[in-house]
Image (tube, rainbow, N blue to C red):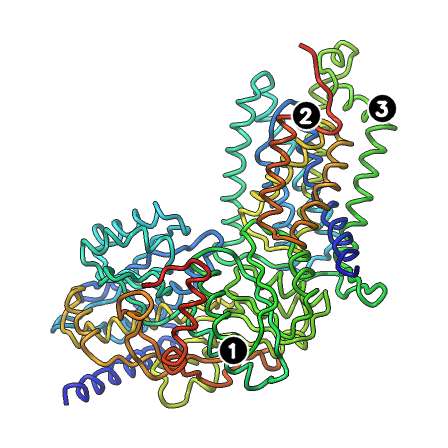
């Protein structure tokens, strides 16, 4: 009964956000707190907004701004009997650890942020001791940041790179003749290697042989030799695990005449890739991050309010900035707000207790706490994850993969590949 | 065998960029004895010019290449007049000033281009030339290597066949002796940095459709330029061109057959080795005090 009540409250809240989205989109309302008597509830974003990783920070801020404007246009959010206007405070750490620590302290101590969203990786590791001591609820897009002691660190949206297995499952089923693969990605521990291990495991489970794995540094300016090198192995599948350099690699694949299947974790700014290659070449590329004007997001089980309205509002103000994280930080924000409302408090201990003690609905359906099997703590919310394929020049969801089911059956294979690459597991 | 030939082709194309990007650094050091740390940012400004004027506003690509050369040359001349010339007798001061310019240009690029993702320029020359069914050269890269080669030949002609070029070489060899011969070292310094900056602008404009453009892209350029300059012989223009070709082929082969990381580390090791074993580089010469 309690869960039923929470579900109703949750749906009401999301409908409210969606209605706000429609109002703001239609009327171009920019809410002004100057006319509001509400208190301000501040949520922090300690993210890269400049530098190489800005595409995985800045679009998330734009997305959260839309959500905050919608909520404020509707009159704010009521938590524990108090109505608040929502404010997003940001700190640009440019993916530098010392700045990330400084940013965390600034957001919490000066801006009074009740929750801080981060990208993940080295910057999260740097802030974690302080954030844990201060009991600050912090979120990451990289579950591999979670340790047995990081009780205030959660990953409620992106379960990078676990979901990549759903793309490989789809590829193996739809293209059974594709039997060999090469993997190319950057050689960092947080993104490239985690993703490489996951793809290696997924390919092994699917019966696909990995004939070459090329891990490159961040100083590459010319991908011609790397692509020439791996294409000499005549692979059926070219896999970009989690590459920061998808566009120049795709360009080289195009020029060097690759005709096999391409699978990638992300395909950010794919319209630019099409401009540099061709629609025909990019068509059929499999990846994991949908556009939110996708009709498949209207089906039941998707809990994001008015995805198409969100997509339109985002692209109206930031036509060239949509990336994988554009909707992910908003999903985290909405999930936190729902739990704060249900817990009747914005304090981290109350919110995280409510989160972990209650059933959570994942944005694409499903929703299980996971993570203790690999990283020592069940602080990763996993659920169905979309498999996206470029079709007629547009990213379109083909199906939702069962991540939990795959992990249940194949966790040991994944652990083996993670250990082989020297990655931390419990 | 196909991979071997393709690797040679990839290496030769890359050598054009390396040579263009390095030659300016060599010229400025040779004539002014200043290590211009902002040289990579001059390449970046060339690339941003093409992105802004061609990709964003639709101006013809070749026009923006010329515009990039003019703009970057202008920046070089301003640097010479207001930074390097007052620091003429203080190489360390010139170096520190150039680091300041580096940051200023990065901030301006961020301001002009905005934060967020790297910028992309659609290739003005589409398609790929296929030789013997297996060797592939994108037309954009073919265009770039031809223009790079033409620019280097023009520079060589200027330095060896024109009076002004002779003067540049004379100042590069011995500044005081050149001045005693009536050569205006101030004027020659302007020519050197102007030509060097023009080459950097051209390199950036040619690279623009082939790489990720961002305010920090000059970082990799300057590292490569330093390796090429030191291996070729500090201050030696022919040395820089030879070193650019050798280093590009070496880097491309090691990247193809081993890994990019090993290639970069090996390149830096070679630079250190040259500094220890043959500090004058391939074509440099020892100057007696």
Secondary element under disc 1, as helix, strand or loop, is helix
- Residue holding disc 1: A168
**Direction from residue B105 to residue A350 in the image, left or right:** left
Residue under the point 66% across and 75% down: A260
The chain identifier of the residue carrying mark 3 reads B
Asked which quadrant contains residue B89, the reply is top right
Residue under the point 75% across and 31% down: B237
- Give B167 or A390, whichever is nearer the viewer: A390
**Direction from residue A309 to residue A75 in the image, left or right:** left
Residue under the point 43% across and 58% down: A422
Secondary element under disc 3, as helix, strand or loop, is helix
Mark 3 on the same chain as mark 2:
yes
Asked which quadrant contains residue B27, the reply is top right
- Give B61 or B11, whichever is nearer the viewer: B11
- Residue holding disc 3: B163
Q: Which of pointers 3 and 2 lies earlier in the amino acid sequence?
A: 3
Of the two numbered discs 3 and 2 in the rendering, the one whose residue sits closer to the viewer: 2
- Residue holding disc 2: B278
**Residue A22 visible to the viewer:** no
Q: Residues within 10 Å of mark 1 (few under 14, many from 20)?
A: many
Can you say whether A332 is above or below A95 in the image?
below
Q: Which residue appears farthest toward the left when viewing the image?
A: A81
Identify the disc placed on residue B81.
none
């Amino acid at each position: 009964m309690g869960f039923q009540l929470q579900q109703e409250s949750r749906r009401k809240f999301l409908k409210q956000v969606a209605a706000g989205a429609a109002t703001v989109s239609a009327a171009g309302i920019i809410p002004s707190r100057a006319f509001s008597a509400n208190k301000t509830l501040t949520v922090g974003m300690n993210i890269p907004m400049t530098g190489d990783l800005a595409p995985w920070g800045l679009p998330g801020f734009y997305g959260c701004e839309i959500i905050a404007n919608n909520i404020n246009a509707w009159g704010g959010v009521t938590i524990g009997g108090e109505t608040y206007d929502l404010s997003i405070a940001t700190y640009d750490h440019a993916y530098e650890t010392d700045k990330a620590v400084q940013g965390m302290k600034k957001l919490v101590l000066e801006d009074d942020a009740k929750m801080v969203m981060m990208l993940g990786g080295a910057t999260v590791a740097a802030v974690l001791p302080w954030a844990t001591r201060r009991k600050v609820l912090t979120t990451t897009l990289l579950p591999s940041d979670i340790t047995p002691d990081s009780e205030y660190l959660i990953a409620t949206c992106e379960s990078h790179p676990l979901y990549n297995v759903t793309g490989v499952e789809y590829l193996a089923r739809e293209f059974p003749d594709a039997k060999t693969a090469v993997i190319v990605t950057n050689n960092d521990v947080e993104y490239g290697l985690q993703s490489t291990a996951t793809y290696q495991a997924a390919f092994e489970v699917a019966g696909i042989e990995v004939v070459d794995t090329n891990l490159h540094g961040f100083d590459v300016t010319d991908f011609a030799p790397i692509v020439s090198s791996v294409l000499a192995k005549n692979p059926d599948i070219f896999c970009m695990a989690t590459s920061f350099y998808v566009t120049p690699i795709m360009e080289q694949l195009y020029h060097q005449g690759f005709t096999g299947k391409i699978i990638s974790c992300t395909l950010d700014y794919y319209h630019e890739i099409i401009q540099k290659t061709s629609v025909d070449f990019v068509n059929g590329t499999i990846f994991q991050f949908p556009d939110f004007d996708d009709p498949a997001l209207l089906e039941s089980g998707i809990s994001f309010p008015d995805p198409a309205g969100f997509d339109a509002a985002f692209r109206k103000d930031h036509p060239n900035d949509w990336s994988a994280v554009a909707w992910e930080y908003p999903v985290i924000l909405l999930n936190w707000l729902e739990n704060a409302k249900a817990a009747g408090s914005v304090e981290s201990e109350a919110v995280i207790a409510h989160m972990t003690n209650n059933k959570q609905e994942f944005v694409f359906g499903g929703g299980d706490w996971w993570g203790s099997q690999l990283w020592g703590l069940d602080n990763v919310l996993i659920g169905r994850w979309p498999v996206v394929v470029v079709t007629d020049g547009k990213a379109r969801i083909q199906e939702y993969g069962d991540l939990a089911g795959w992990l249940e059956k194949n966790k040991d294979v994944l652990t083996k590949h993670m250990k082989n690459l020297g990655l931390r597991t419990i | 065998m196909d991979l071997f030939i393709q690797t040679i082709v990839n290496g030769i194309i890359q050598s054009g960029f390396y040579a263009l990007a390095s030659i300016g650094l060599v010229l400025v050091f040779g004539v002014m004895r200043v290590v211009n740390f902002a040289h990579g940012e001059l390449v970046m400004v060339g690339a941003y010019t093409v992105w802004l004027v061609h990709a964003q506003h639709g101006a013809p690509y070749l026009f923006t290449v010329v515009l990039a050369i003019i703009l970057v040359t202008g920046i070089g001349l301003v640097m010479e007049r207001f930074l390097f010339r007052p620091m003429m007798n203080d190489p360390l001061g010139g170096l520190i000033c150039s680091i300041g310019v580096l940051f200023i240009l990065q901030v301006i690029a961020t301001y002009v281009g905005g934060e967020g993702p790297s910028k992309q320029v659609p290739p003005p020359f589409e398609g790929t030339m296929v030789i013997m069914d297996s060797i592939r050269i994108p037309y954009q890269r073919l265009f770039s290597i031809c223009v790079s080669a033409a620019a280097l030949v023009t520079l060589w002609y200027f330095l060896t066949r024109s009076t002004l070029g002779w003067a540049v070489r004379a100042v590069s060899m011995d500044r005081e002796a050149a001045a005693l011969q009536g050569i205006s070292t101030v004027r020659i310094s302007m020519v050197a940095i102007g030509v060097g900056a023009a080459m950097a602008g051209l390199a950036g404009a040619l690279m623009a459709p082939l790489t990720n453009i961002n305010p920090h892209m000059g970082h990799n350029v300057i590292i490569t330029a330093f390796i090429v300059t030191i291996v070729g012989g500090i201050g030696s223009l022919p040395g820089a061109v030879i070193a650019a070709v050798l280093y590009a082929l070496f880097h491309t082969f090691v990247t193809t057959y081993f890994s990019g990381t090993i290639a970069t580390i090996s390149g830096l090791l070679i630079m250190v080795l040259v500094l220890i074993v043959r500090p004058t580089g391939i074509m440099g010469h020892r100057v007696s005090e």
